[in-house]
Image (cartoon, coloured by chain):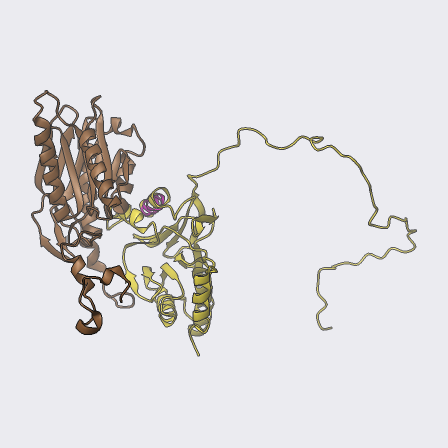
Chain colours: A brown, B yellow
Amino acid sequence: MDHNPANWGRPRADVYGPYNAAIHNAGPMARTQQPSITGTSVIAIKYNNGVMLAADNLASYGSLARFTDQERLIKVGEETVVGLSGDVSDMQYIQNLLERLIIEDNYEQDGHHLRAPHIYEYLSRVMYNRRSKIDPLWNAILVAGKKDDGSPFLAYVDLLGVTYSAPTIATGFGAYLAIPLLRKLAANDGDEKNITQEQARAAIDECMKVLFYRDARSLDKYSVATVKTDGQVTIEKDVRCKDMSWRFAEGIRGYGNQQL
Amino acid sequence: MPGFNFDNYQRNKFLAAKGYPLPKATSTGTTIVGCRFDGGVVIAADTRATEGDIVADKNCEKLHRISPTIWCAGAGTAADCEFVTQLMSSTLELHALSTGRKPRVVTCLTLLKQHLFKYQGHVGAYLIVAGVDPTGPRLFSIHAHGSTDVGYYLSLGSGSMAAMAVLETKWKPSLTKEDAMSLCAEAIEAGIWNDLGSGSNVDMCVMEVDKPAVLFRNYRTPNERSTKEQSYMFARGTTAILKEKVRPVVDTVPFDIVQETIIQDVDKMEIDS
């Protein structure tokens, strides 16, 4: 007699061959994935009257620049913008979640509307809970808007549930290339009071240009979102990198010995 | 047989698995940059050397002299940069004596890349080589596996992206010496502040055509340790003396001087008479 309960009720292995355990995994895979279609950096900086974000319009399929019209900055509610990088299908799922969040919040009709800190809290709970199930949403997200006291709000949450807030934040390659430039304007908490909108915009445009130079998965077409503390939200689309300089290439031939 | 001896590879792997890994080589973490200007080239580096997560040296020298007018900034494994650079310096000097000409940067480049390629990247030297020679100012970068690049502005090391962000923003084709110097200093500072593998001070070397190269050790020192708030020295008497015993070590019995002879030039060595 076979004393192993796992084999009771099953055909005998010595007669019918080994048991196919793979049938237990029938059903969709719901574990740590690899991102498939991805968006690159999102960058953001606080300034005196609000927050400015930018993200390019590229959705890459590995090294293929697959979709060049992907909008990665989304307006949530009336006064908040969320910028997402990482897996695009998870990005779209989160977009759906946020839409339902706003709709369901409006059921109350109590005159209160969700603001950036609330949307951020919700998102960071979702992200951390998914990571705790070892089934993350493969994104890095920036939430920008205003706090209940009227001051600018900017915070980060990612696939691990890591959260932090700073006057300048960037995801992906932006962390290495854009943050050093943005920190020249706003190095510490409170520095944003001295930055004008024009300065912030100039810094953002400069960073997107440098990212296009040096990030191999970036695009020169991007969107810029401005979230003001007076409640205005504008998303400017189809912005192009301007005044790029490729003239350095004129004088370069070969990789060492070759002369002009 | 040239190249490394890998006989101990299996033994080392076994030991590492048992909990005795190889000690981490001192790396230079590092931000290094080079920039051409009208009439010369300037290179700069930070001064932090790391051993894993620890800062091993707060003020190390990453700018190496290969010849009086050819200098080199090194990132990667500190020892590899130092020794490969010294080797090239000797080889280049002998070569220059043999050819009767001033050494050229491309010569150094070729010698370095052939050496590094032979060791298949195991000699962890990532270098920015720059200098002036009879053909003019030159700027190159070399990776440990032996690939070389040319450029008017280059950066290497863990802080290379922070430095490159500054270089891409502020570089333009015709720079003066002062512009190039401040650009390089700013690029290194971006690495110092934003990269954890880089820190402390900025070293710089300016190589101008028809002028001697000038090394600016600690060109900028934005991380000076502030004066301590108090003196933490212990006052004499803090530790009580319980017992004192003096034992004479040197014989102090006085001698009578019988004869005095004064010897001149004691330092000169006796050569064959």
User: On the rendered structure, is A55 left or right of B247?
Assistant: left
Q: Residue at x 69, y 31 (%)?
A: B238
In the image, residue B193 lies at what x, y percent?
36, 41
Q: Identify whether A144 is placed above or below B190.
A: above
Rendered view: A15 above or below B192: below
Magenta segment: does it hold B187?
yes
Question: Residue A72 at what x, y percent from top left?
Answer: 12, 43
Q: Which residue shows up at 42% across the image and 53% down it?
A: B28
- Confirm whether residue B67 shows in the render: no
**Within the magenta stretch, is there residue B269?**
no
- For residue A58, say whether it is visible: yes
In the image: residue B131, left or right of residue A9: right
Q: Quadrant of the C terminus of chain B?
A: bottom right
Q: Residue at x 42, y 59 (%)?
A: B77
Q: Position of residue A47 (x, y in %)?
A: 22, 30
Side of A101 relative to A248 (left or right): left
Range of magenta residues:
B180-189
Q: Where is residue B268 shown, x and y percent of the image?
A: 71, 62
